[in-house]
Image: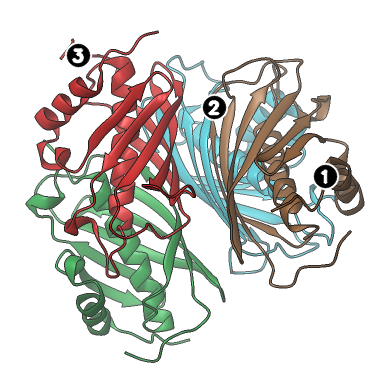
Chain colours: A cyan, B brown, C red, D green
Amino acid sequence: MTLKMDANALMAFLRAEFGQVAQDFVVDRVALEGLCLRMPVAERHLRPGGTVSGPSMFALADVALYLAILSRLGPVALAVTTNCAIDFMRKPAAGVDLLAEARILKLGRSLAVGDVMLFSQGIPDPVARASLTYAIPPVRPATY
Amino acid sequence: MTLKMDANALMAFLRAEFGQVAQDFVVDRVALEGLCLRMPVAERHLRPGGTVSGPSMFALADVALYLAILSRLGPVALAVTTNCAIDFMRKPAAGVDLLAEARILKLGRSLAVGDVMLFSQGIPDPVARASLTYAIPPVRPATY
Amino acid sequence: MTLKMDANALMAFLRAEFGQVAQDFVVDRVALEGLCLRMPVAERHLRPGGTVSGPSMFALADVALYLAILSRLGPVALAVTTNCAIDFMRKPAAGVDLLAEARILKLGRSLAVGDVMLFSQGIPDPVARASLTYAIPPVRPATY
Amino acid sequence: MTLKMDANALMAFLRAEFGQVAQDFVVDRVALEGLCLRMPVAERHLRPGGTVSGPSMFALADVALYLAILSRLGPVALAVTTNCAIDFMRKPAAGVDLLAEARILKLGRSLAVGDVMLFSQGIPDPVARASLTYAIPPVRPATY
C-alpha cells in the first residue's frame, strides 16, 4: 500500500474544503504508519490560564486522524466522524504548540478506526488520548 | 437537595470565568433533573454546507454538563473534564439553534458523571449523544 | 413503525443463536421506545464481595441493545458491536437482579446507535451507563 | 521508578483476590512500559462460530491494565474501573490465544488512565482497542 496524498496535498485539501480551520493546522509528517499534525496555538484556542481548550484538542485529534485516512484513501470529503472517546489527562503547557500523533488501526470498506495521542511540544507525557471512528461513504471521488 | 445556582447565576459565572465562550451559550432552563443549554448557531460554528462542526457540538455538550454540575455544587471553576465519549448520529439542521439536554447521573466526592443529548431545535431525532466525566477538586470555593 | 419481534421471539432467538448465554437474560419488556432486560444474578457473575463483575455488566448492556435492535429489524444474527463506551458509577447491590433499560437513538442503514442504563433492582440510582454502536450487515435474513 | 510487582507477584495476587478469573489469564511480560497479558482461549469464552465473545475481550483488557497499574503501585485491591471505551475492529481468529498489550498513560493520585491493544496470537492487525480509567482509593494497602 502506498500513500495517495502527501503533506502538501493534504494541506491543499484542507485549505480548499475546510478553509475556516486550515490555518489552525500544519501537517508535520505523514507516512503509512501515521500522521503528525501540529496546532500552532493561538489566542482563540485558549481557556483562562493560557491552557488549550477541550474543543480545540478535540478538533486537533479529529483533523489529524481524518487527514491520516485521506492520505491512504485519497480525498474523501464526505467521510464523517461517527464516534470519539477522549481522555484529558494533563493540562497542556502554556505557550507551546500542540502535536497530534495519529495512527490508523482499521481501514475497512465502510468504517475507519484510529487513535491519536496529543502532546505539548517538547514534553513527553501526553496531554490527551482519543480514539475515533469514521463512516466512509460508498462512492469515493476521484483524485484531487 | 436544592440548586445552588440558577440560570442567571450560571450565565454570570460563564461571563466572568469563560468570557471568550460565554456569548456562544444561553441557559434555557435549569432544574435538579438537568439543564438545557442553547447554542445560537453563528458563522464561526459551521462547516462547509452550513452544518455545525464537531468541536462546536463537543463544546456545547461539555459546557452544558459543566453548568449542570455547577448548579448543584455552586461555582467550582476548577472542575475539569477528564473523559468524553460522543456519538455523532445525524447532521444538524442548517439555520436553527442547537440544544443540549444535560443530566447528571452521579455526583460523587471526586467524580461527576452525566450525559447529554443534542438536538437541532424543532427536530425530535437527536444529532449527537455524549457522556462526560469531571474531576472535582477537593477544595470548593465559596459562593459566587 | 411496528416491532418485528416480541419478548418471546427475542428469547427464542437468544436460545437458538446464543445458547451459552441465553440463561443469563430475561426480556422483561419490549416496546418501540426501548427494551428492559433482566440479569438474574448468579454466582458466575460475581466478584469478591458479592458485586456483579464488569464483564457481566458489559454483557448485559450489549445484549439488551442488541435485542432492542432485533425487535425493530427482525433477526439479524450478524449485526456486530463495533464500539462501546461504559461508565461504571456505583457498586451493584448484592443479592438483587440487575436491570438494563436500553433505547435506540439511531437505526440507520449500516449503523445503529443506542444507550443503556443499568440498575440494581429496586434502587433508583444507576450503577452503570453504556452507549454502543452496531454495524448492520447489508443483507438481512428472513423472518425467524 | 521501579516495578513493585513482577509477573509472579501479579499472578499470586490474581489467584488470591480474584480466584474465579485467575485461570483465564497469564502474565506473559511486565515492564515499566507496559504489560502483556495472555488469555488461553477456552470454550467458555466463545460465541457461535468459535470467536471470542465481547465480554471476554472486555475482561482481558480490563484485567491487563489493572495488573499494569498494580505492577507500579503494589497491590491495591480496591482500585475500580470507572470508564471503558472499546472498539471492536476484527473478529478474533479461532483456535489461538488472545493477547493484550497494556500501557499506562497517566498514573495520578486519584485516577489512572491507560490503553490496551488486543491481538489474536500471530496476527499483526489488532482485533480490538480499549482505553480505561481507574479510580485509585486514597489509602493504599501495604505490600503483598
Could you tell me how many numbered marks the image carries? 3
Give the CA separation, mark 1 to mark 2.
37 Å
Give the quadrant of the N terminus of chain C: top left
Res A40 seen here = no
Q: Position of C131 compared to D49: left or right?
A: right
Residue D77 falls in image quadrant: bottom left
From mark 3 to mark 2, how far is it between C-alphas? 28 Å
Where's residue A122, x and y in %?
67, 67
**Residue at the outermost bottom position:** D143
Q: Residue at x 65, y 41 (%)?
A: B33
- Residue under label 1, please give it: B6
Contact check, label 3 and label 1, Cβ < 8 Å: no
Does residue C117 appear to the left or right of A54 in the view shown? left
Q: Chain of mark 3?
A: C
* Marks 3/1: CA–CA distance: 53 Å
Q: Amino acid at mark 3?
A: Pro
Amino acid, disc 2? Val
Q: Which residue is mark 2?
A: A80
Q: Is residue A121 above or below residue D85?
A: below
Q: Are marks 1 and 2 on the same chain?
A: no
Question: Disc 3 designates what residue?
Answer: C141
Which amino acid does the dot numbered 1 rest on? Asp
Figure check: D116 above or below A26: below
Residue at the image point whose x is 26% and y is 84% from the top: D9
Element type where label 1 sits in the image: loop
Residue C84 screen position, x and y as percent: 40, 42
Q: Nearer the viewer, mark 1 or mark 2?
A: 1
Decide: marks 3, 2 in contact (CB < 8 A)?
Answer: no
